[in-house]
Image: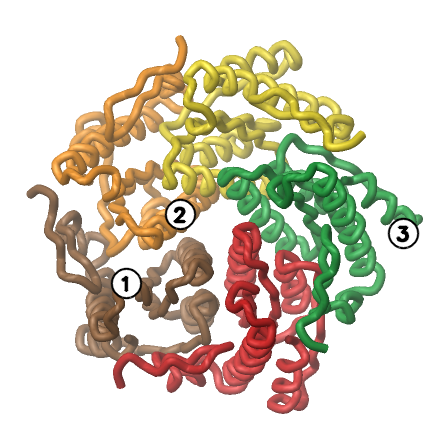
Chain colours: A red, B brown, C orange, D yellow, E green
Amino acid sequence: MAKYAIKVIEYELPKATIIRYTVPGIKDIPVAARKLLIDEKCDAVITFGWVGPGLVDKYSYLAMSIGLIMLQIMTGKHIIDVTVHEDETNDPDELYNIAVDRAKKHALNLVKLLKYGGEALTKYAGKGLRQGYPDVGSLKD
Amino acid sequence: MAKYAIKVIEYELPKATIIRYTVPGIKDIPVAARKLLIDEKCDAVITFGWVGPGLVDKYSYLAMSIGLIMLQIMTGKHIIDVTVHEDETNDPDELYNIAVDRAKKHALNLVKLLKYGGEALTKYAGKGLRQGYPDVGSLKD
Amino acid sequence: MAKYAIKVIEYELPKATIIRYTVPGIKDIPVAARKLLIDEKCDAVITFGWVGPGLVDKYSYLAMSIGLIMLQIMTGKHIIDVTVHEDETNDPDELYNIAVDRAKKHALNLVKLLKYGGEALTKYAGKGLRQGYPDVGSLKD
Amino acid sequence: MAKYAIKVIEYELPKATIIRYTVPGIKDIPVAARKLLIDEKCDAVITFGWVGPGLVDKYSYLAMSIGLIMLQIMTGKHIIDVTVHEDETNDPDELYNIAVDRAKKHALNLVKLLKYGGEALTKYAGKGLRQGYPDVGSLKD
Amino acid sequence: MAKYAIKVIEYELPKATIIRYTVPGIKDIPVAARKLLIDEKCDAVITFGWVGPGLVDKYSYLAMSIGLIMLQIMTGKHIIDVTVHEDETNDPDELYNIAVDRAKKHALNLVKLLKYGGEALTKYAGKGLRQGYPDVGSLKD
């Protein structure tokens, strides 16, 4: 998924330095994010994780999520966490499309937060926008 | 939901400065709250999150909740967390009303805590008051 | 529930200063406890929470519990957490009695820990004592 | 369960000072362990907890476990956590035997770690040793 | 499982000093990792855990995982966590093979991260590589 996000970031932030860090499993993501944010002084991190369908996979997802949230609280920097769950669909093509769509949209979300700050996404709030799926629309205007 | 809460806060605390920060997903809420409480020196935060019906959505809710609680413990400041779960009802109109009611009531709760401190809500304790639903009443007087 | 615990504490520790802090929901309890233990320099906290029957309610309970435990580890002070779950019984009268019994017994537990230290409850260990229900007795003498 | 563990420790480490600390519920164990490790400067803690069969009991177990693990990470000292779950068996006698066996074996584990360090248990690794039950043997030699 | 990983590490990093630390249960792993990373100044840790099939076993796994992730965030060092779940298969021989395969592959992952840094595994990302099972292949090229 990373290459689609990298394309978005390179296009939107052409002067940005992008550092990749690949880990064996999703539970290794938080320490990699920590190295990037603290040791490498990156401004933000976007992570890509693939989660299996089992209960243990979901617990690993939960542990990773808690770790990433604590790290963000410690550093005050965004970690946009792009996760695809194998049980979102049984169709491999659809799963691939979900992953690509989610990676691209979240890369753009991150760019907007970095470029324009915390109000950048306000106009999209409550609009039922989805990453990985078509948008669902807002409940009321 | 934010606009209903903002109206309440503006009415009750007309001199307050309100800063909005919109994030892509609920797991991004804790770092935004951290930026508001620590970097922006806000006195409190009220968050608005929309949670899907799946198990993974609920795990994300759990991770977010743990993060917000740890952040409150670190800062000693209130973060009132207004969350609406898509599976609270199948009726979109009802879900909308739940969200609005919950946002307004929790905004008022936050105002009371900020204005009058920890005893402000004591007279309502055990009265079965609900946010998002009609109150249920107390078990005994 | 608080008033029953307060009566016990006032009777057992007549010189104690009791500070109440009421919050909108159980996830707001840890920050209130933090304010009492650190800002107000209280020696201990006893919390009263009412937890709904749904999965999300239980996740909120879990997040609150993790927060309270981390706060106790940070401060080295006891937070006795009195929680009543709405699904403990379908009978409102029984639920009320559980709440009152649990509040009183845990208030007394806290008093004993504060007055006599960590060995105060040793003689009751393994005796099957319950808070909110009749005691169940020990497995063997 | 404590008395069986104490006997083992007194026999194996006759010069050790043993401090007991009894708490009302399992969620109170981490703060007691914290007082023993930090305030009382104990070298290690062994905890004894009794966990009910319900989902909430298991969430309390989870919260306690997270707290004890964080405390061990903070202090660098072992907390051996002896827990018996009421739903391990329906036979009270068997449950009693599980508790006693587990308490004794874990007390001995702790003694070995304290006396001989991190390699003390290496020869038993992968041997299918169980605490509370008969050993199950290793998969292969 | 440890001996298979040790062989890989000794072959790949012949000058490395390897310290073993064996603990009674998986919840004791984080403090041992902490001692190795902080007290013994190890560059990394690889852990081997055996997890039972019950819900409580999985909660212990979750607590351990959260602890290991927090420790990695604190230290900025990798802890590669090799876990085998008894319910992955009913066939003891297959379980044994899973354990050995996973231990070897993760030892090699760790070696690559230590030798070549965060880009060492990038060429394998999204290829559907598995530890403990045959690789599943990527969704698309």
Q: Identify the residue at horizontal 43%, vertical 63% (top origin).
A: B57
The picture places residue B117, in percent across and down from the top left corner, at: 23, 57
For mark 1, name the chain. Answer: B
Q: Secondary structure at mark 2?
A: helix
Q: Secondary structure at mark 1?
A: helix
Quadrant of residue B96 in the image? bottom left
* Label 2 sits on residue: C62
In what quadrant of the picture does the C terminus of chain D appear?
top right
Front-lying residue, B32 or D130 = D130
Report whether B32 appears left or right of E38.
left
Picture layout, residue D107 above or below residue D76: above
Report whether B86 appears left or right of B128.
right
Q: Tag 3: Cα neighbours inside 10 Å, few (<14), some, or many (≥20)? A: few
Report, in whole angstroms, how far the alpha carbon at label 3 lies from the one at label 1. Answer: 55 Å
The picture places residue E98, in percent across and down from the top left corner, at: 73, 46
* Label 3 sits on residue: E13
Disc 2 marks a residue whose amino acid type is: Leu
Mark 3 or mark 1: which is in front? 1
